[in-house]
Structures are given as structure tokens and as C-alpha cells.
Image (tube, rainbow, N blue to C red):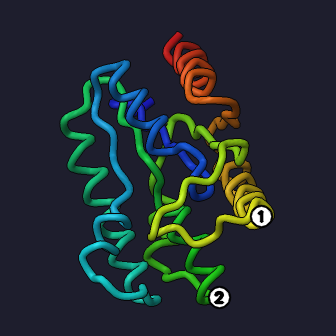
């Protein structure tokens, strides 16, 4: 296994990815990689286009690589290029080859897939508050987790239950 162990937190919008990443990082005193798209989209101050998704993907990878250098045992990644892939396909019907190549190249030790059982939290950068759409995207992420070849676990419940579920999985990972 690589060091640090990279833990990918994946899931639809407003399913607690950032909260779980931050909670795990605080518990282990390790870094977490925030979602670069948020920073990028706030800077451009306009609707994103297809080309923006490649820039967001490159920014996400660069941020993850930079923070991996600071991690000792774990790096908690609040999203990865799978999100770029899903959004690109959904919005534009295609994904840049660089994104697909990087998805195939990058390795994670565990994927924590966040369920849609948390209430929607409004945010100007979020697009699909409907539970039906959140479940649609959850199925897309589940399929990618299954195809990844990496161990994965669906985390559900409130913030404390999700954290405990993740901690239990991480304890098994290091045993």
C-alpha cells in the first residue's frame, strides 16, 4: 500500500463529503484535500463550461499531490476526478481524455461513498436539490466505485454515525 494511504470520499452534492473529510482529518491530525471546484468556480464568477472541467480536474490533482507531501499516514480526499467525469458526461456528453487517463492512473486505498440520506443544504454552487437527482448521481458514483477495483464502503446516517463507520473501516485497513 502507498503511504500515505489515500482515502477518497465520493458522492453526490450535499451528502456530507466535506464534513466527513474534515472530521477524519481532525481525528487523525492529517490533511484533507478540499474540493478544488468550489475555489475555481467562485473565482470565475460565471457558469462553467466544458474546458473549465479540465482546469478544475488539473487543479484537484495538483492540490491532492501537494497535500499528500504533508500527510504522514492518511490523506483524506474530498472528491476526485470521478466527479469531473460524472459532471462532464452529464452536462456535456463527453469527458476529456486527460481526466479519464488520470482516473485510471490514480490509486486510492479506500473509497467512502456518501449516501443521500442527509437533508439537502442549499448552496449557490450546487445544482440538483431533488432527491431523485441525488439518487441518480449516487448510482453513477456507486458504479464508478464498483469499477475502480478499490475497496469501498457506503456511509450513511448522521455525522457521528458516518464518522464512526469510516473510523471502523480505517482501523480494518491498517490492521
Compared to 171, does 154 lie above or below? below
Q: Is residue 13 visible?
A: yes
Q: Please name the residue shown 73% across and 49% down the image.
A: 146
Q: Is residue 81 left or right of residue 153?
A: left
Q: Helix, strand or loop at disc 2? A: loop
What number is the disc on residue 136?
A: 1
Q: Please name the residue shown 63% across and 80% down the image.
A: 89
Q: Position of residue 40 (x, y in %)?
A: 30, 72
Which of 161 and 124 lies nearest the eye of the viewer?
Answer: 124
Label 2 belongs to which residue?
A: 93
Q: Position of residue 98 (x, y in %)?
A: 43, 76
Q: Comparing marks 2 and 1, which lies closer to the viewer? A: 1
Compared to 126, does 166 lie above or below? above
Q: Helix, strand or loop at disc 1? A: helix
Quarter-of-image position of residue 22: top left
Q: Is residue 123 left or right of residue 151?
A: left
Label 1 Cα crowd, 10 Å radius (few <14 / some 14-19 / many 20+): some
Q: Position of residue 114 (x, y in %)?
A: 63, 43
Compared to 65, does 50 lie above or below? below
Q: Position of residue 78 (x, y in %)?
A: 44, 47
What number is the disc on residue 161?
A: none
Q: Please name the residue shown 74% across and 67% down the image.
A: 133
Compared to 156, does 61 lie above or below? below
Amino acid at each position: 500500500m502507498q503511504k500515505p494511504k489515500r482515502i477518497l470520499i465520493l458522492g453526490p452534492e450535499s451528502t456530507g463529503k466535506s464534513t466527513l473529510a474534515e472530521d477524519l482529518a481532525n481525528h487523525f491530525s492529517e490533511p484533507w484535500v478540499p474540493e478544488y471546484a468550489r475555489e475555481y468556480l467562485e473565482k470565475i464568477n460565471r457558469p462553467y463550461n466544458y474546458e473549465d472541467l479540465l482546469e478544475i480536474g488539473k487543479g484537484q490533482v495538483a492540490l491532492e499531490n501537494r497535500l499528500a507531501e504533508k500527510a504522514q499516514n492518511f490523506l483524506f480526499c474530498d472528491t476526485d476526478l470521478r466527479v469531473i467525469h460524472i459532471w462532464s458526461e452529464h452536462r456535456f456528453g463527453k469527458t476529456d481524455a486527460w481526466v479519464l487517463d488520470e482516473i485510471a492512473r490514480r490509486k486510492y486505498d479506500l473509497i467512502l461513498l456518501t449516501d443521500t440520506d442527509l437533508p439537502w443544504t442549499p448552496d449557490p454552487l450546487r445544482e440538483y436539490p431533488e432527491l431523485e437527482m441525488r439518487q441518480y448521481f449516487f448510482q453513477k458514483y456507486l458504479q464508478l466505485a464498483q469499477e475502480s477495483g478499490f475497496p469501498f464502503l457506503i456511509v450513511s446516517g448522521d455525522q457521528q454515525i458516518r464518522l464512526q463507520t469510516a473510523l471502523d473501516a480505517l482501523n480494518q485497513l491498517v490492521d
